């Protein structure tokens, strides 16, 4: 049996522990956020009951949302100001494109059966 919790439900705000790290730049936010994300996913992997699973999924989603708060600035730093429009639009359209592509692939997989 597969149990799922919607990641968008748990990642509506950035993880509060990462907020003070922004004054040191983006790198600590990436490192601490990724470490917490991995730790909470280990909690999910080794959970014995549904409560631990749900808490781990919620905290993992919250820790993973720290990337969303600084990734736009990272994209803006990589490209020149005159060239940042296309990469930024590609980055921001990623979640929407992935969902639609996933649905299309699922439909094609069902039709191939």
Image (cartoon, grey):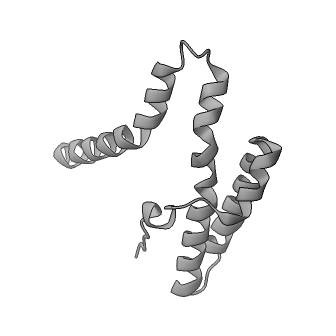
Q: Is residue 31 visible?
A: no
Placement of 100 over or under 38, stated as above or below: above
Q: How many marks?
A: 0
Comparing 106 with 21, the one in front is: 21
Q: Position of residue 19 (x, y in %)?
A: 71, 57
Image quadrant in which you'd find residue 104: top left
- Residue drawn 46% across the image and 62% down it: 7
User: Is 91 on the left-hand or right-hand side of 40?
Assistant: left
Placement of 31 over or under 7, stated as above or below: above
Q: Position of residue 101 (x, y in %)?
A: 32, 39
- Residue drawn 57% across the image and 47% down it: 68
- Residue drawn 78% across the image and 53% down it: 21
Q: Position of residue 41 (x, y in %)?
A: 63, 66
- Residue drawn 62% across the image and 71% down it: 45
Q: Position of residue 3 (x, y in %)?
A: 43, 74
Image quadrant occupied by the N terminus: bottom left
Q: Residue furthest top?
A: 82
Image quadrant in which you'd find residue 35: bottom right
Q: Is residue 73 visible?
A: yes
Comparing 99 with 2, the one in front is: 99
Placement of 72 over or under 1, stated as above or below: above
Q: Residue furthest left?
A: 111
Placement of 56 over or under 18, stated as above or below: below
């Amino acid at each position: 049996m597969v149990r799922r919790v919607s990641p968008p439900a748990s990642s509506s705000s950035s993880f509060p522990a990462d907020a003070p790290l922004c004054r040191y730049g983006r790198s600590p936010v990436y490192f601490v956020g990724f470490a917490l994300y991995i730790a909470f996913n280990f909690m999910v992997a080794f959970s014995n009951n549904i409560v631990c699973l749900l808490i781990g999924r919620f905290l993992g989603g919250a820790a993973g949302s720290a990337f969303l708060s600084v990734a736009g600035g990272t994209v803006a730093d990589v490209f020149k100001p005159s060239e940042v429009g296309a990469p930024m639009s590609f980055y921001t359209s990623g979640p929407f494109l992935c969902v639609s592509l996933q649905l299309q692939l699922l439909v094609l997989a069902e039709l191939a059966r």
